[in-house]
Amino acid sequence: MLAEGTQVCHFLAGKCCRTSRLVGPNAIRCRVSATKLTEIVELLWIALANMLLVCWVHRSLPAGSAGDECAMRIKTVIVAAMLALGCAASQAQPAPRLYLTTEAAAPHSMLEGKRVIGIGADTVREIMARADIDHTIELLPWKRAYTAALERQDTCVFSTTRTPERETLFKWVGPIGEADWVLMGRADRKLNIATLDDARRYRIGTYNGDARDLYLRARGFDVDPAPNDLINPRKLMANRIDLWAASIRRGSATLSRMGYAGKIVPVLVFNRIRVYLACNRAVPDALTARMGTALESMERDGTLGRILHRYDDYGAAQGR
């Protein structure tokens, strides 16, 4: 009767489990969602009540007959129910929710009403949709956005330049974009710069804490960091800096949109980079793998190109 009782409980738990199988003589192993726990409890209570009723009917039977059989069945139901519910509770974990951070850098990421849009934001949002990952996106100053991904176990930051110094700090998904690092100068000032080393005698405006700022600092350049990259063109026009280390998507209309067409010009492209979604090391590998698969499907079906051209009128400032 023990085996029969176990089969009854296995059947009841299986009603609510996506997969269910016996492990050992009387244990149940299953995977369930939290919404199924109530259904499991209800079914097991019904089974227990039915067995109690049968045992009450046979309460006067002598030992060793159906009375003992009923007692054994009840014990089996109770043990199996406890095992099933314990397993269910351990498996019924809430779906992961990621906190995604980025900065305000039109047209890569910007607010439209209360919604974050842009090339990077739209790309990442589509990745999450295809990977079926719940998420929120928040605009922050770059250093706060980056630090959040370092410190919070549920956080990813975009769009992040993948450098050797950062390689072991994150789990990387991408690339989700690319850009040129460009030294920009005033059009009315002729600077003789053929290599990056030629710029050592000049003061270079950077965005505090971003990859270009760190790159130039590490190589001993004279940098003048700003808390917002959009301050640097104004500093350049006011002769407070000699050059501006910008990140520009090839073919973008960023300078025209900002009103600097013909006033600020590229002097030297000193690096070509790809940018990524950088996730905290605690983000599960299964999630980053799903994101990677989603991104590959976007590349295959042309979604990435369509998102890029959606913002042709804006240009881009990518790669922090």
Image (cartoon, helix red, strand yellow):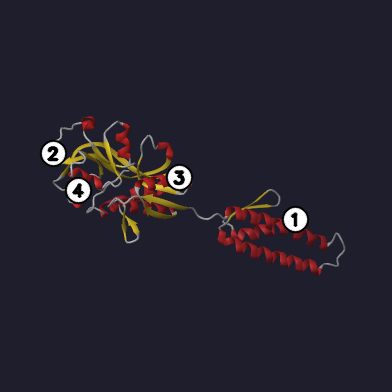
Checking the image for residue 255, the label placed there is 4
Asked whether residue 236 appears in the rendered view, the answer is yes
Q: Type of residue at label 4?
A: Leu
What secondary structure is marked by label 3?
helix
Spatial CA distance of label 4 from label 1 is 79 Å
Q: Earlier in the sequence, mark 2 or mark 1?
A: 1
Q: Quadrant of the N terminus?
A: bottom right
Spatial CA distance of label 3 from label 1 is 52 Å
Q: Type of residue at label 1?
A: Leu
Q: Earlier in the sequence, mark 3 or mark 4?
A: 3
On screen, residue 217 above or below 15 = above
What secondary structure is marked by label 2?
loop
In the image, 107: left or right of 97?
left
Checking the image for residue 151, the label placed there is 3
Q: Nearer the viewer, residue 105 or 91?
A: 105
Q: Nearer the viewer, residue 256 or 124?
A: 256
Q: Earlier in the sequence, mark 4 or mark 1?
A: 1
Q: Earlier in the sequence, mark 3 or mark 1?
A: 1
The crowd level at tag 4 (other Cα within 10 Å; few <14, some 14-19, many 20+) is some
On screen, residue 302 above or below 182 = below
Q: Nearer the viewer, residue 247 or 178?
A: 247
Spatial CA distance of label 4 from label 2 is 17 Å
In the image, 111: left or right of 264?
right
On screen, residue 255 above or below 189 = below
Spatial CA distance of label 2 from label 1 is 92 Å
What secondary structure is marked by label 4?
helix
Q: Which residue sits at x=41%, y=53%?
A: 128
Of circles 4 and 2, which is in front? 2
Checking the image for residue 2, the label placed there is 1
Of circles 3 and 4, which is in front? 3
Label 2 belongs to which residue? Answer: 189
